[in-house]
Image (cartoon, grey):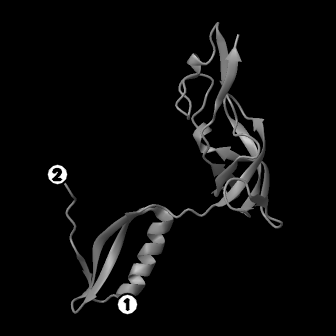
Amino acid sequence: MSGKPTWTPLTYPDMRLSAAEMNALAHAVVRLCGGSFARAIADGAGVHVRPGRRITPRDDGFWARITGSTADGDNRWTYSWEEVAKTGAGYGGWGALDDGRTGADNAYNSIEDMNAATGVQGNGVDVAHLDTDDYTFALQPCPTDAVVWMREVKVDGDAEYWFAYENGVDGGCD
């Protein structure tokens, strides 16, 4: 098999949903789960499902400002945060929402998920190259006041909050 996959139209003559209703349902499911959008087409023979465009999962998230960090193992941190909204044009202009969500040490950086004391970290840096006789550098947490796109994730009914931020490296000469 080479090239594009072969798609076979499916026919549902006893379908109780119209093509428009089926499209709306399929689009909602794909927006939540990701995948290829299946397009329903109605004609005299019934409703046919044909492949459509690829779309990504829905981004149900919110803007948050990092308000602090606490070490949580080697090259990992937990983060405190507050929900913010854009209140002015350009850089800056982010304000905390009066009724916004907040969290204390319950946010995690997905880039740090694979971090450890040794080896290549989530940001692509091998920590073996950060400390020599001539210089000492280390990964840094996401800085306080950074604005990130946050997502709530339920784990066994408990909410965790996740964002992605490429950790910087800082240090100096010995």
Q: CA distance from mark 1 to mark 2?
A: 36 Å
Asked if residue 92 lies left or right of residue 126, the reply is: right
* Residue 165 position (above or below residue 150): above
Residue 16 got which mark?
A: 1
Question: Residue pushed farthest front?
Answer: 90
Q: How many marks?
A: 2
Q: Residue at x 63, y 49 (%)?
A: 163
Could you say which is closer to the camera, residue 114 or residue 100?
100
**Type of amino acid at the residue the image marks with label 2:** Ser
In the rendering, at what x and y percent does residue 28 appear?
A: 48, 73
* Residue 110 position (above or below residue 22): above
Element assignment for label 1: loop
Is residue 103 something one can see in this rendering?
yes
**Type of amino acid at the residue the image marks with label 1:** Arg
Neighbor class of circle 2 (other Cα within 10 Å; few <14, some 14-19, many 20+) is few
- The part of the image, by quadrant, that contains residue 159 is bottom right
> Label 2, on which residue?
2
Tell me which label, 1 or 2, sits earlier in the chain. 2
